[in-house]
Image (cartoon, rainbow, N blue to C red):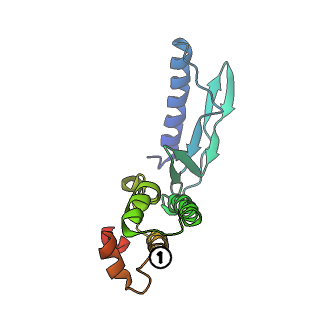
Amino acid sequence: MISKVEDSDQLQQDLYKLAGWSDKWLLSFNPEKCKVMHIGHRHPTQYYMEDNGQTRCLQTISEEKDLDVYITSDLKPSRQRAVASQKAMSVLGMIKRNFKRITVHDFKILYNSYVRPHPEYCIQAWSPYLVADITQLEQIQRRAIKLVQGLKNTAYQDRLKTLGLYDVYEAI
């Protein structure tokens, strides 16, 4: 954790040592691909890395995607939820366009195979806790359930039981 100027200086010295080690072992880093993300409200410090005798400034970012999980500098899962929701909604749209009649059995197969994996991917890493995020995930499920034939006039909780699903608020 960088809390003092000395900590920032120490990190910069470590970056110089890392560059020296990489040159010694002929495993050079590409400073263009190295990035810095500042988490918190402190004023960001600029960091540098040496590349073939030249000192290059490392790029400062506020968002990074790794293994299809978005990490932002405020550590809120809203960006991850937005991307996952968009993917799930587009798959739902594709299902709606291509299937005229969806039975309970068909729904279970389609929803569990194609829609549900998008909002649940790496949910342990980004665990939605904001009401807006949870509501958006619930919206996906509500839209999906409307596709099932014969359940239009039943209550939401009864539809969930019939389809073997659970309420998003209870699951989280």
Residue 100 seen in render: yes
Q: Is residue 159 above or below residue 17?
A: below
Give the amino acid type for the residue marked by disc 1 in the picture.
Lys
What is the x, y in percent for residue 130?
44, 70
For label 1, the SS is: loop
Categorize mark 1 by other alpha carbons within 10 Å: few (<14), some (14-19), many (20+): some
Q: Is residue 53 above or below residue 83?
A: above
Q: Is residue 166 above or below residue 81?
A: below
Q: Going 58% across and 65% down the picture, which residue do you hit?
A: 93
What is the x, y in percent for residue 128?
42, 64
Task: Please tell me in which quadrant of the rendered image residue 73 appears.
Answer: bottom right
What is the x, y in percent for residue 80?
51, 58
Nearer the observer, 27 or 14? 27
What is the x, y in percent for residue 87?
55, 58
Q: Which residue is mark 1?
A: 146
Q: Going 41% across and 52% down the picture, which residue do you hit?
A: 122
Q: Going 50% across and 30% down the picture, which residue do you hit?
A: 14
Q: Residue furthest front?
A: 101
